Amino acid sequence: MSSSSNEEEVSSSTLVAIDTDKNSKHAVKWAVDHLLEKNSSCTLIHVKTKSLNRNEFDSETKEGRPPTEEELHQLFLPFRGFCARKGIVAKELVLQDSDVSSALYDY
């Protein structure tokens, strides 16, 4: 019986992948409007991608280096604020992989 409750918890989880693209804002808004209720929670996921070349990051900053913890914090800030205004608790998760879809699938 406990595995059934675990399955319910997993199936009711809402995960939204975000990045610096403007479409992330629309994805979070859609999830909040269509999937989530007030006082529920969701997990915002950002995949920090690293290409096969050791020194090359796909999610580089303007300075050509991987984003710092503070820059990642700033990435999540507007999404957390939007969720909070709607009464949603947003958790943050940063994954690192060379392929975004693989990272999300494996998670």
Image (spheres, rainbow, N blue to C red):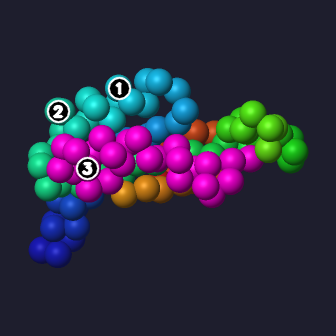
Amino acid found under the numbered disc labelled 2: His
Q: How many other residues sit within 10 Å of disc 3, few (<14), some (14-19) or many (≥20)?
A: some
Mark identifier at residue 84: 3
Front: mark 1 or 2:
1
Q: Which residue is painted at 47% across and 56% down in the image?
A: 93
**Is 53 located above or below residue 93 in the figure?**
above
Label 3 with label 1: CB-CB less than 8 Å? no
| Circle 2/circle 3 CB separation < 8 Å | no
Residue holding disc 2: 34
Q: Earlier in the sequence, mark 3 or mark 1?
A: 1
**Residue of label 1:** 26
Q: Nearer the viewer, residue 49 or 76?
A: 76
Label 1 or label 2, whichever comes before in sequence order = 1
Q: Sort mark 1 into few (<14), some (14-19) or many (20+) by Cα contacts within 10 Å.
A: few
**What is the quadrant of residue 58 in the picture?**
top right
What span is colored magenta in the figure? Answer: 66-90
Is 78 magenta? The answer is yes
Left or right, 93 with respect to 72, comes to left
Residue type highlighted by circle 1: His
